[in-house]
Amino acid sequence: MGSEEEPLSTSAQEPSRSNVGGYKHQTWLPTIGMVFLTVNSITAVYRSINDPWTVMFIVTAYANVILLVYYMRNIDKMPEMKRPVRMKATVWTLASTLTVLFTYRVSIMLPVFLAIIVWLMACVIVFGGFYALLVNREEPDLCNKGADKVFGHVEVALHYLGNPIRSCLAGVTVQLIS
């Protein structure tokens, strides 16, 4: 209640009580998730030991997820502007491999028409990720200057909506802005 309040720290590199050594402590949730994934993968391999293709799928997917988590954690520790393109390309390759693996497993169970739709969606995800991670060179908007464009589009949409919906959405927009 005093007038001397400590400013909030936005830097992950400043040591504090919960941030010893310059890095935030690891929470238990990711560790529990990785243990669950490992136990689940071992169980799946044990159940499908007679089907070598399924075992290969499980092992590949597991290794892919482990590597993806490893590289994503390394990327998250780096500043936005200093992330190497090679590391981004590795993340895109791992994520694309997972997408293709799971798309294949799902598409073999579907009728041809639905399988084509699933493969098209996977292609959109893979190529969209390629564009977002490797081709798009725009600097990140750290000050959120693009928010006025978003709310400008919301206002145009509200103009064409009916009065009851417009008043309801206008209240939501005002709450989002303030």
Image (tube, grey):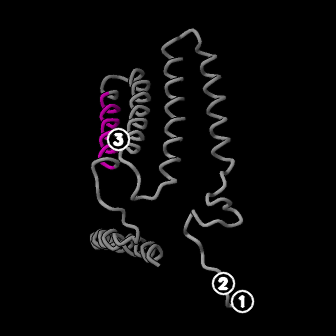
Disc 2 or 3, which lies upstream in sequence? Answer: 2
Most foreground residue, 21 or 123:
21
Is the Cβ of the residue at disc 2 closer than 8 Å to that at disc 1?
Answer: yes
The residue shown at (63%, 30%) is: 38
Residue reaching furthest bottom? Answer: 3
Is the Cβ of the residue at disc 3 closer than 8 Å to that at disc 1?
Answer: no
Residue hosting label 2: 5
User: Which mark is in front, 2 or 3?
Assistant: 2
Is the Cβ of the residue at disc 2 closer than 8 Å to that at disc 3?
Answer: no
Q: Residue 173 carries which label?
A: none
Instruction: Find residue 99 and report its image quarter.
Output: top left
Instruction: Find residue 6 and report its image quarter.
Output: bottom right
Which region is colored magenta? Answer: 116-132
Task: Measuring from the top left, give residue 163's x and y in whole percent.
Answer: 35, 74
Residue reaching furthest top? Answer: 50
Q: What residue type is labelled 1?
A: Gly
Is residue 24 in sight in this rendering? yes
Task: Measuring from the top left, give residue 33's x and y in whole percent.
Answer: 63, 40
Q: What residue type is labelled 2?
A: Glu
Assign a secondary structure to mark 2.
loop
User: Which mark is in front, 3 or 1?
Assistant: 1
Which is the main secondary structure of the residues drawn in magenta? helix
Label 3 and label 1: CA atoms lie apart by 52 Å
Residue hosting label 1: 2
Most foreground residue, 71 or 132:
71
Residue hosting label 3: 125
